[in-house]
Image: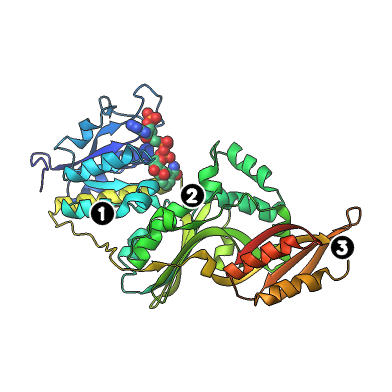
Amino acid sequence: MKNVNPKDRSINVGLLGLGVVGSGVLKALTQKSALITKQVGCAVHITRILVKDQDKPRAVEVPKGLLTTDPSHILEDPQVHIVVEAMGGEMPALDYLRKALQEGKSVVTANKEVMAKHGPELLELANKNCVQLLFEASVGGGIPILGPLTKDLRGNEITAIRAIINGTTNYILTKMTYENMEFDEALKEAQELGYAEADPTNDVEGIDAGYKLAILASLAFQTKVAAKDVYREGISRLAARDFRYARELGYVIKLMAIARSEGGQLEARVHPVLIPKEAPLAKVDGVLNAVEVEGDLVGRVLFHGPGAGSMPTTSAVVGNVLEAASNIARELPSSSLITLDRVMTLRSISDLVTRYYIRVTVSDQAGVLAQMAAILGNLQISIASVMQKEADHRDQTAELVITTHPSREKDVQQALKELEKLEMVREIGNFLRVEE
Ligand SMILES: NC(=O)c1ccc[n+]([C@@H]2O[C@H](COP(=O)([O-])OP(=O)(O)OC[C@H]3O[C@@H](n4cnc5c(N)ncnc54)[C@H](OP(=O)(O)O)[C@@H]3O)[C@@H](O)[C@H]2O)c1
């Protein structure tokens, strides 16, 4: 057993971070030590914990002498076999992960930002040093999804992934759907409940979901998808009326992360979509997450559950720790099941073909629809339905909600520009894609 003290045959874990996730990991590894020893074949101990502030009160009881503020106490200690990173952020976490792998330690991380931006480099480093790099908790919290993608579903050609992978935005959208709230009100409530951070940018602008989609798409399509390759739009421009109109049309609105492969091309995008209200993903509410995978053999499978939180995330981290520990205990070679060598071109959002929802405020007078239909028709955009809503008599305006048949995004964008120039069009209220 490599580097394992033969006297007490224990596998030593160095934990980086003792916050929401780190505390859960310490608790679980301590409370379940007997079960873990049985499963792994030897004891697994946390021997050192890196924090920023040693004097901070902790949510868990920490055995004396475990805390340190010096990363070398873990990264350069030859007795540490596995490094669990639960610090978050790109730096210094990236440097610490590189160092741990170079030192021949297996690594378990919950860090989506580092994996989305530097995953291929770190996986290569792990392979080079014959150690494992596992990161189940980086996507979907407690939902096992990366394991199935890299193991159980390997026999499939994956064709699509559709996912709700940000609990904060799903909570906000659920409130807007069922309680007719405006975005600001729903966000404020999410912040009061601790579901959204004081600065909610990462969540509401789709950055967090973009990181997770980059990881999912890389593994599913065995190619390198970086965070910057993912097209991204957030949810802050959605209005309560969009949810009412969507409902009347038979849809709900969700922030969806979608990756699809077609003819060697890959699309990867995060944005709000209308999905049919009877679709399984439409029923994923509150802070829950879900990932739907479509494969040529399996068809569609849905992974559904808690996408964050101390204990669900701990479940994923501890599962990875046990896998790494078992491999070390059995002296198994640490060859990775992950290959990212497929060459695929990324399809630009302007080449997307889908259905669209367009909400426009117009002057309430005859002929306006004919003018709009002419612009859409000239760009080969065919109208599927038109609803006229909420005429404002004082203002002499009306709101039109148009849905289209499948159309090309660049044509729709061009149409929106032309519609905006029409004298009778007061405002393009919103424009959303429909995912059938
Ligand atoms: N929270 C979740 O539900 C969840 C779910 C899935 C994945 N994740 C991921 O898990 C990771 C950790 O998240 P978290 O919510 O547990 O974060 P957190 O509560 O903010 O905890 C971060 C911990 O890391 C320590 N730390 C941060 N920067 C450090 C530095 N430069 N040097 C030493 N220690 C440092 C902090 O030390 P102090 O305590 O001394 O400040 C703290 O203990 C992130 O990558 C996150 O994206 C979290």
Q: On residue 207, which mark appears?
A: 2
Rate crowding at label 2 as few (under 14), some (14 to 19) or many (20 or more) other CA atoms within 10 Å: many
Among the two numbered marks 3 and 1 on one chain, the one whose residue lies closer to the N terminus: 1
Assign ligand 1 to one image quadrant.
top left
Kindly indicate whether the residue at mark 2 contacts the one at mark 1 (C-beta within 8 angstroms).
Answer: no
Displayed quadrant of residue 428: bottom right
Closer to us: 165 or 48: 165
Q: Residue at x 19, y 51 (%)?
A: 131
Q: Amino acid at mark 3?
A: Asp
Closer to us: 61 or 124: 124
Q: Residue at x 36, y 25 (%)?
A: 53
Displayed quadrant of residue 262: bottom left
Q: Amino acid at mark 2?
A: Ile
Counting from the top left corner in percent of width and height, residue 152 is at 32, 68
Counting from the top left corner in percent of width and height, residue 64 is at 27, 25
Q: Amino acid at mark 1?
A: Leu
Among the two numbered marks 1 and 2 on one chain, the one whose residue lies closer to the N terminus: 1
Closer to us: 361 or 283: 361
Q: On residue 123, which mark appears?
A: 1
Counting from the top left corner in percent of width and height, residue 425 is at 78, 61
- Residue 280 lies, with reference to residue 226, above or below; the image says below
Q: Residue at x 32, y 50 (%)?
A: 118
Query: Gap between marks 2 and 3, in whole Å?
Result: 39 Å
- Residue 328 lies, with reference to residue 192, above or below; the image says below
Counting from the top left corner in percent of width and height, residue 278 is at 61, 69
Q: Is mark 3 within 8 Å of ligand 1?
A: no
Q: Residue at x 62, y 71 (%)?
A: 355
Which residue is tagged 3? Answer: 364
Closer to us: 274 or 322: 274
